[in-house]
Amino acid sequence: MKEINYIAAELNDRILFADNHLLAVNKPAGLLTQDSGTGLRNLEDWAREWVRVDKNKPGAVFLNAVHRIDKVVSGIVLFARTSKALSRLNEDVRKRNVKKVYHVLVDADPKKPGDKLVHWLTHENHKARVCKEGDPGAQRAVLSYRTLPRVGKFKCLEVDLETGRYHQIRAQLASIGCPIVGDTKYGAKTKLPGGAIALHSRELHVMHPTQKTWVKIEAPYPAADCWRV
């Protein structure tokens, strides 16, 4: 397997929050969150090298992703730096005591300026599909969106994710005729370089695992042309 060189300093501008318990990074589209077994470059190994160098830690570094976002998606990924933090954050995720906000550019304007979408989703062959309640493997998917000012020629939506289903935002927005820019898998007409899609994990609100205070993390938009006003 080809050796991958991770340079810690290259990650500096993408660090959004760092202390002894948490590390939040602004992931670029096109990069895996974790090792997929293919040996491809991934954010978790890159962030682990950053901790090793920045904190001058010899030997193995504990770092685990609390959640993942798709390779084609950009934005916030949160890592736990201790096993205690990981356990507490995993419990908060399970109890839905974590708020995730996404910004997304869509290929067509929605009919309503804001709405709550409730669907049942299943997935196979690396794609989610809207189905009926009671269908085999069906899971309830809920999100709310509101429109934001246009970004360039595209309508921008803010999405408040209530559940975390496979490709949920991508499938639900496509189902109302608003596929995400670049997301040709779900019917988008506009393509983006490198197979990226215009879905960005913009905000994350979590309870700090030791301080017990809310932490708000925000990720700047990507430098891609589609996000330029």
Image (cartoon, rainbow, N blue to C red):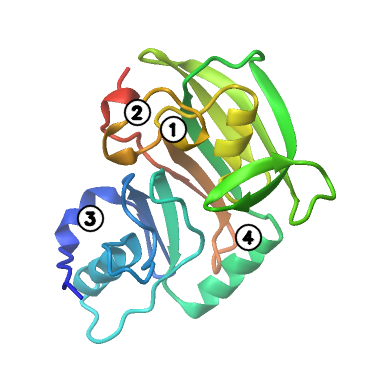
Q: Earlier in the sequence, mark 1 or mark 3?
A: 3
Residue 180: % across, % down: 48, 29
Q: Secondary structure at mark 2?
A: loop
Q: Which residue is mark 2?
A: 191
Which amino acid, mark 2? Lys
Q: Which mark is residue 11?
A: 3
Is there CB contact under 8 Å for labels 1 and 2? yes
Q: Is residue 214 visible?
A: no
What distance separates the C-alpha of mark 4 from that of mark 2? 33 Å
Q: Is residue 176 above or below residue 34?
A: above
Position of the C terminus, as image quadrant, is top left
Q: In the rendered image, which residue does mark 1 sit on? A: 184
The answer to the question of whether label 4 and label 2 lie on touching residues, with beta carbons closer than 8 A, is no
Secondary structure of the residue carrying tag 1 is helix
**Badge 1, how many Cα within 10 Å: few under 14, some, many 20+?**
some
Q: Position of residue 152 (x, y in %)?
A: 35, 14
Report the number of discs. Answer: 4
Quadrant hosting residue 78: bottom left
Disc 1 residue type (three-letter): Thr
What residue would you read off at disc 4?
93
Q: Mark 3 falls on what kind of element?
A: helix
Q: Is residue 222 above or below residue 29?
A: above
Query: The residue under label 4 is which amino acid type?
Result: Val
- The residue at the point 39 percent across, 31 percent down is 182
Q: CA distance from mark 1 to mark 2?
A: 7 Å
Q: Secondary structure at mark 4?
A: helix
User: Which-is-in-front pick, marks 3 and 2?
Assistant: 2
- Sooner in the amino-acid sequence: mark 3 or mark 2: 3
Query: Disc 4 to disc 3, how far (Cα)?
Result: 26 Å
